[in-house]
Structure formats: C-alpha cells, structure tokens
Image (cartoon, coloured by chain):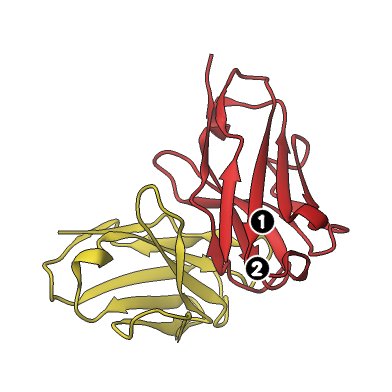
Amino acid sequence: VQILESGGGLVKPGGSLRLSCSASGFTFSNYAMSWVRLAPGTGLEWVSTVSGSGANTYSADFARDRFTISRDNPTNTLYLQMSSLRAEDTALYYCARTVAVAATPFDSWGPGTLVSVSS
Amino acid sequence: IVMTQSPATLSVSPGERATLSCRASQSVSSHLAWYQHKPGQAPRLLIFDASIRATGIPVRFSGSGSGTEFTLTISSQQSEDFAVYYCHQYDHWPPTFGQGSKVDI
C-alpha cells in the first residue's frame, strides 16, 4: 500500500487550494478515503471522508461549507478542494484509508502535504 | 467525543516500559485505535479495537481497556519507538483523536 499527498503550499487568507492523494497497492474503490489534518501545537483532526464509490461524502463542521472531498477511482486519486482558507487551516494534511466510512480505524496513511495560510 | 491523553510528554530510557493513557468523555466501547507518528512520516496504525495489534506491529506494543479508559503499553522501549502517540475513537461520529503523547528519551 502506498499513499502520497501533493498540492500543498503557501496561500493567502481567502484563497483556494486543491490537494491530491495518489494511492496504489490496493483496490482503491473498495475503501473509503479520508483527509485528516495536524495543525501546529494540536492533535490530529478529521476533515472529510468519501465512500468507496464516491457517492457519499462527510465533512467536519469547519469544513462543510468550504472544503469538498472527491475521488476519481479510475486514476486511484483522492482530492480535497479547499476555498475561503483561513490562518487556522494551516496544517499538515494527511490522506488515510479505512475499510468503511464509519466505525473503522485509519489503517494506512500518507506522509502528508503542508498547507500554510498567511498573508 | 473528547479524547484526553496523558501524560503530554513521557521521558523513558531504552529498555524501560512506557505506559500511555487515553480517556474518552463517554463510552466508546472497544472502538479505539492507537497510532505512532514520527516527524515527516505517515502516522502508523499500531492497535485497533483497543487491543488488537495491526499487521507487522511488534509484540512489545499492547493495548487494553474499554468504555472510557484505555492504555497503550510499550513493554521495552526501543530507540525507534520515540515518537508521538495518538488515540482515536471510531465508535461515535465524527471520529476524534486525542491531542497526543510524546515519548522521548
């Protein structure tokens, strides 16, 4: 199993960014995929989850109106479209795999991509 | 569900036992996982369902507990075990994590 995030960078407050996550070594469509972030000085925080088919998505309250999770199963890629970014969104963003949308642990993770929101 | 980990930092010597605690604000049954995280690396699943070691995890890592109180024990700390450890409940939606416990030398 290999998971690798990309797309992070420095963006101004109010700006947008799209993160990507490339996966290999497993049948991508059989797994729900999630984004989890780690902000400076805090613990891990769940952001969003998408079902294996892509039909169902779920997001944390802080992300619901600003972030959109999606996936492209033919290319084994997960996305997170982020808009109206705030300083508090500065974090390492991790892509993680779960067997199901809920009630299961994150069994594989990528090394993360850094998002910095600053003027 | 709020997950509270203690201690925030634990200093141990190689070969010593390390014991980390995680408390849930309400019962999460046995739906609890532990992860190891080193800087610049992907978090690694160590324990799921409170006490089951994930594939490839050494036997020196063990988990226990149910309901609201959980423990991760490293029976004999190795140099590669110095890291931050997070607990995670997946019994209630949304999934939540503890703030982490750092194990250093």
Q: Chain of mark 2?
A: A
Residue kind at label 2, given as amino acid type: Thr
Left or right: where B17 falls relative to A11: left
Give the mark nearer the N terminus: 2 vs 1. Answer: 1
Left or right: where A77 falls relative to B42: right
Depicted B24 relative to depicted A58: above or below: below
Question: In x, y percent, where is residue A15?
Answer: 67, 21
Q: Chain of mark 1?
A: A
Q: Colour of chain A?
A: red
Q: Secondary structure at mark 1?
A: strand
Left or right: where B46 falls relative to A16: left
Residue B6 vs residue A56, the one in the foreground? A56
Q: Residue at x 36, y 77 (%)?
A: B71
Q: In the image, which disc is placed on residue A34? A: 1
Q: Does residue B25 appear anywhere in the picture?
A: no
Neighbourhood count class around disc 1 (C-alpha, 10 Å): few under 14, some 14–19, many 20 upward: many
Question: In x, y percent, where is residue B46?
Answer: 43, 74
Q: Quadrant of residue B81?
A: bottom left
Q: Residue at x 33, y 86 (%)?
A: B59
Q: Secondary structure at mark 2?
A: strand
Residue kind at label 1, given as amino acid type: Ser
Q: In the image, which disc is placed on residue A22? A: none
Q: Does residue A36 appear anywhere in the picture?
A: yes
The reply to whether label 2 and label 1 mark residues of one chain is yes
The chain coloured yellow is: B
Identify the residue under disc 2: A98
Residue A84 vs residue B41, the one in the foreground? B41
